[in-house]
Amino acid sequence: MIRVFFALLLTVASFSLFYQPIEAAPISGSFTVDLVFAPNCVNQFNALEVRLPCTKVSDTIMKFEADLVVHLRVSGLEVGSSTVFTFEGLEFQALHIASVIGALTVRDTFIFAPSVTEIEFVRTNETLSLRYCINLSAPGDMTPPFVDCPTPDETLYFLMEDVGIYHPAHQNLILATIYDGAGMLNVPLMFRKKIVELSLNIAGLTLSTRALFANIGSVTTPSYSAGLVLALEGQTISGILIRAETWIGTRQGLECFAECKPFEVYRVGKVLSPANFTIQEEKIFIRNLVLGSFILAMRAEFQFFTQPGSSTPTPGLSFFQIDWRTRPIFPLNLSFANELRLGSDLNPHYDLLQVFWKFGDFSVTTSWIFYISSMNMWEGQLAEFIATFDPPGVTITQHLILCTEIYFVGYCAGGVFQHNTYISAAAGNITFSGKAKFIGFFGFSELWIDAGFKVGAVDFIFSTVLKLDYLAVVRVSTAIHF
């Protein structure tokens, strides 16, 4: 009840800003309302679970959400507020303060939420692909449906990242039902995180400090942890960018709050227990290294902790990546890019070679994957083929994901794992985008539709995901910008 009352009070106070004269204060922001519907054959506690067949006449589950973002800028000081409301009232509140004092930039963030989820970055053993795992969650337990560290969790990664597996509206619904079913949204709001970032620019060098303070306990028994990320970045006369990071009491990962929607995710690292306030990781980045027609970048990661069961169980070098790309080669207008991943022993695990070609409104991207097969030999496979036609006002894309052995797809027929067709168009204040996904070349899987209409400062958006056997989700959204 307190959360509902606080939510109503904050809403009234926030909307009163709209009626102040513009000259009174430089205020900007947005207010967005989302309604998401799904059939009742979708499990109300976990939208990943579907009971088929869905009935022709069906009840629905509905998710309501309202997001309020407000920014106030006065004399070099920026104050912001990000708020999420649901049927239960106030679900998430973040306060932001930023200021620039000469060469010093200061940013401070306070986060209040009913729950916190600590997610660590891990890599798969075969290809060193980035994945997520649950390190800690409070007050509920998120494993299952997700998995504990250090086991890589593809489902969690795909739900958190927009990589084309789930429509954003479907992602939002799945995460909301899972977190609600685990009791992560039912407790009162409490202080969960404070992020302090200091950045100082001196003689071309940027010194930065990120201090993280988190409460991973409960309302009655708080538990505080802290961590530091120290960074030094500079640029040489030739334009090479070099950055070094030291992670103390924290590791690469993210912390999300409440139902872990994008609005509630902070990608600044995850804290550890006070007993682990030691150097955990070191990272070195080198970018914009030009050698002839090649532009190179390198990334080296070192860990100073033991994690049995991971791709790098012992301290030392944990990951090394080399990227290079070329400038367009004329008159063919070809360009190349490559990503090579090496493990702790500096043996290569994965190589991605991409070729880009553009002619007028037509462009093509092809991707080859090279990896170590079960016979301990390098194999190469054409992995993806993307063709785009982009005349004024319309974009049409054909995306073929091809079979690339057991490491990448578990089932494949006819040489094509998945075929996607994208169409997007804009005419005046109307926008439209659609995506049709096929298993194999012609086996229909699902259809995404997003349509938008803008009237002045108001946006209206309609989204739906149609599966082969049922309508997965419908979202109606309205956003007011001020």
Image: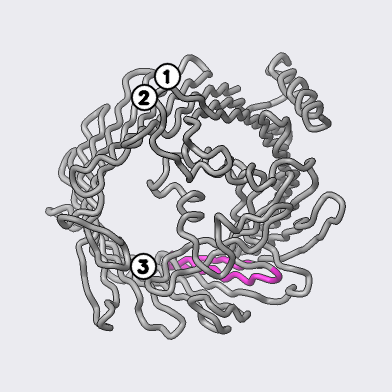
Residue placed at 23% from the left, 57% from the top?
Answer: 412
Secondary structure of the residue carrying numbered label 2: strand
Tag 3 residue: 323
- Report the span colored magenta: 231-249
Residue 238 located within the stretch drawn in magenta: yes
Residue placed at 40% from the left, 49% from the top?
Answer: 163
Expressed as whole percent of the image width and height from the top left, the position of residue 192 reads 76, 50
Tag 2 residue: 431
Q: Is residue 121 left or right of residue 200?
A: left
Task: Give the mark nearest the N terminus, 3 or 1.
Answer: 3
Q: Is residue 184 left or right of residue 482?
A: right
What is the residue that sits farthest to the left in this orientation?
331
Task: Give the mark nearest the N terminus, 2 or 3.
Answer: 3
Residue 340 location, quadrant: bottom left
Can residue 70 be seen by looking at this rendering? Answer: no
Identify which amino acid the numbered label 3 is placed on.
Asp
Q: Which colour scheme appears in the figure?
A: one colour
Front-most of 41 and 341? 41
- Cβ–Cβ under 8 Å for marks 2 and 1: yes
Tell me: residue 280, above or below residue 369. Answer: below
Residue placed at 47% from the left, 75% from the top?
Answer: 319
Categorize mark 3 by other alpha carbons within 10 Å: few (<14), some (14-19), many (20+). some
Tag 1 residue: 453
